Amino acid sequence: MVRERRAARDGRRAREFEVFVAGAGGRLLHAAALLTAEPTGDTEAAERLLTAALARTYARWDRLRGEDPYDHTRRTLAALFAHRGHRYRHPRGGLLARLTPQERLVLVLRLYEGVAEEQTAAALGLPVERVRAICTRAVTAMRSAAPRRGATGRPPSAGTSASTGTPASAGQPQAAGTPPSPGAPPPSGTPPSAGHRTVTDAAEAGTGAGAGAGPGTGAGTGAGAGAGTGVAP
């Protein structure tokens, strides 16, 4: 009887966890890929980081006691990245590759995930003023890398020449080297849900974005230990 109850409980937990991963896995993977600064289609480090975070969420599933599993996984993901930040000092061309690991972490939490300054500071063990300064520095770096604006002060629209602001001829290829618009889909994982800005958009506006979860892909599970909390510069 005890064995049957345990099997039933384990089965319920596995089903609940699978539903959670199916709904939030894509968004979490995209956040992880922003942290590791990996290029499109090559997110091996991000997948390993997310799998470790999901494993710890699964191990604590029955002890979450009403806590949002997405928030728990996000905090674990951030803590793991902070602890392992030295591994990601030399990014390979991801969207946030020009930023340091610490800047990436703060920018992802503040702008992509919409976590408040106070919560971000508490999670990373930093003063609020320090978090604000890091975020400002990261936003400035991303703005300097944003696509050049046209003569009207607005980014060229689809089908418009990036250099002159005039409509391109039908079937005319876009000039080589023209950067994608700030609203282009993110490099990996599931794009943010409707109404949610990309990191580039948020950095361009200098404002945060709301958090949410979009449909995505699953990841492996298993038991794990507690995450570190140090932040790599």
Image (cartoon, helix red, strand yellow):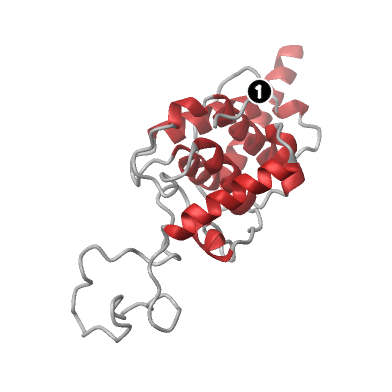
Residue plotted at (72% across, 39% down):
121
Position of 136 relative to 170 (above/below): above
| Count of numbered badges drawn on the protein | 1
Position of 190 relative to 103 (above/below): below
Where does residue 122 sit, x and y in percent of width and height?
A: 75, 36
Q: Point out the residue furthest to the right here.
A: 65
Residue type marked 1: Ala
36 lies left or right of 12:
left
Residue plotted at (58% across, 37% down):
18
171 lies left or right of 61:
left
SS at mark 1 in the image: helix
Residue identifier under label 1: 59
Q: Is residue 68 visible?
A: no
Residues 51 and 180: in front is 180
Q: Answer with the quarter of the image where residue 15 lies.
A: top right
Q: Quadrant of the C terminus?
A: top right
Residues 63 and 107: in front is 107
Where does residue 2 sit, x and y in percent of width and height?
A: 76, 13
Position of 144 relative to 220 (above/below): below
Where does residue 61 sit, x and y in percent of width and height?
A: 70, 29
Residues 90 and 119: in front is 90
Residue plotted at (38% across, 82% down):
151
Q: Is residue 34 visible?
A: yes
Where does residue 142 sit, x and y in percent of width and height?
A: 47, 55
Residue plotted at (42% across, 62% down):
146
Q: Answer with the quarter of the image where residue 6 lies.
A: top right
Structural crowding at the residue carrying mark 1, measured as other residues with C-alpha within 10 Å and reported as few (<14), some (14–19) or many (≥20): some
Q: Quadrant of the N terminus?
A: top right
221 lies left or right of 92:
right
